[in-house]
Amino acid sequence: MIELIKEYAIDVTRHLLQKLNTDKSVMDVTEVENGGKMDKKEQGKKNRKSGADFERRVRKDLEEKGWIVDKWSNNVESYSASEGIALGFGAPITRQRLIPAKHKFRGPGIPMSMGTGFPDFICIKVHDLSYPQTYLIKFVESKSNGYLNKTEKEKCTWLQNQGFNIEVAKKIKIKNRIHIEYKEFKCKTQ
């Protein structure tokens, strides 16, 4: 009897999922059959795809607003300088610098990915049309949830200390429609 109820529940769920296939937050049929659990590999693929989709959406939104957008191909690297030990501070001084981003290996027979820089985009816009030599420049990092991890915050802080304007693009839903909210990154002064 319990087996019949389980089969009926799976059939009903499968039928409802086929009708509500537009909402990505609803569990897949494979998730229902596995008891609501999703394989880590599948979850990673889904997250990577949704992140790439959101990056494309951010780029399109910025271009519609009149910005010239390009993928940023540099990264901020932290390295240790030995002057800290030589000066008697006990620990090496960590410094940061801008380096070309390394390409990621995606597997045999697949071209290496080029877009691994931080932040995601550099945006340029003519500031004053009467004097076209002046430009507005900003960096945009796209994050679906809007949160940066510790190393990303350190990189943003360093870029901001170098005089760059950094914004974080966050996905928000209003009436089942995805909108993009841009927040300027503010570094915490110590």
Image: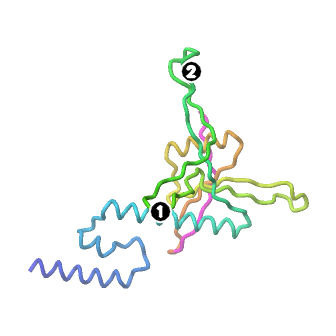
Q: Residue furthest front?
A: 109
Mark 1 residue crowding within 10 angstroms, few (<14) / some (14–19) / many (20+): few
Q: Are marks 1 and 2 in contact (CB under 8 Å)?
A: no
Q: Is residue 103 left or right of residue 159?
A: left
Residue 186 in the magenta stretch? The answer is: yes
Specify the segment rendered in magenta.
177-190
Q: Nearer the viewer, residue 166 or 120?
A: 120
Earlier along the polypeptide chain: callout 1 or callout 2?
2
Look at 64% across and 69% down and name the residue there: 60
Residue 14 in the magenta stretch? The answer is: no
Look at 41% across and 65% down and name the residue there: 46
Q: Which residue is mark 1?
A: 110
Q: Position of residue 95 (x, y in %)?
A: 59, 32
Q: Which residue is mark 2?
A: 84
Using the image, determine if residue 78 lies above or below residue 131: above
Q: Quadrant of the N terminus?
A: bottom left
